[in-house]
Amino acid sequence: MKKNNEVSIKTINIHDQLVWLVDFYRKPGDGVVSMCRIIAGQLNLSGSKETKWTWNYVHQVLNNKMIPSPKFVRTVFRLYSRECKKENIEFEQIVVVAPKGFIEKNSVVNVESKKCANPKCRLFFIPTNPVQKYCSIACKRDFNRRKSCQ
């Protein structure tokens, strides 16, 4: 149940960000298809090389006809963060625990936190790599050790 709420909240946020991007890239006389093609092109430039978004995919997500993939959500957020002025993004101040000297005071973090894949660990962490699953090497070793014993 909690997972569905998280997905719907992300979908609402991504829809708002797509609407903002449409307004940002819109030129007088642009139709819906050409507008979605422009946004798809920008997403393809800022995303990975193996994933190409079509105007139709952007159009379906924009009209709430399709739930966007997690990769699409990340790519839209990346483009939105890059194009949007700092004042337009909603920021919140939170407490982050980090090794001394890793994060400067008043730093902005533009990455979503992840829950550690080790079921025994309850930590959320900022991944240094998009495919990182565990909060630390020790946590990964602990999980693999437990898995091999079963």
Image (tube, helix red, strand yellow):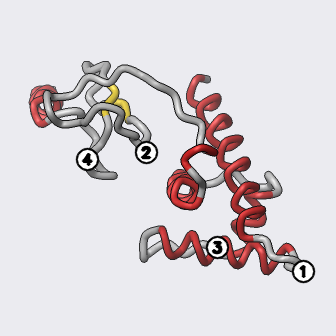
Q: Nearer the viewer, mark 2 or mark 3?
A: 2
> Would residue 44 be seen by someone viewing this image from the given angle?
yes
Q: In terms of sequence position, does the residue under pointer 2 or pointer 1 come before the other?
A: 1
The label shown at residue 29 is 1
Q: Cα distance, mark 3 to mark 1?
A: 18 Å
Q: Cα distance, mark 2 to mark 4?
A: 12 Å
Q: Nearer the viewer, mark 1 or mark 4?
A: 1
Q: Which residue is mark 2?
A: 110
> Would residue 69 be seen by someone viewing this image from the given angle?
no
The label shown at residue 128 is 4
Secondary structure beneath label 2 = loop
Residue 24: image x %, image y %? 72, 64
As rendered, which of 45 and 8 lies closer to the eye?
45
Q: Which residue is mark 3?
A: 40
Q: In terms of sequence position, does the residue under pointer 1 or pointer 4 come before the other?
A: 1
Q: Nearer the viewer, mark 3 or mark 1?
A: 1
Q: Residues within 10 Å of mark 4 (few under 14, many from 20)?
A: few
Identity, as a three-letter code, of the amino acid under mark 2: Asn
Q: Using residue 67 as the reference point, say whether residue 34 is left or right of it.
A: right
Residue 68: image x %, image y %? 64, 54
Q: Residues within 10 Å of mark 3 (few under 14, many from 20)?
A: many
Identity, as a three-letter code, of the amino acid under mark 1: Gly
Residue 146: image x %, image y %? 14, 26
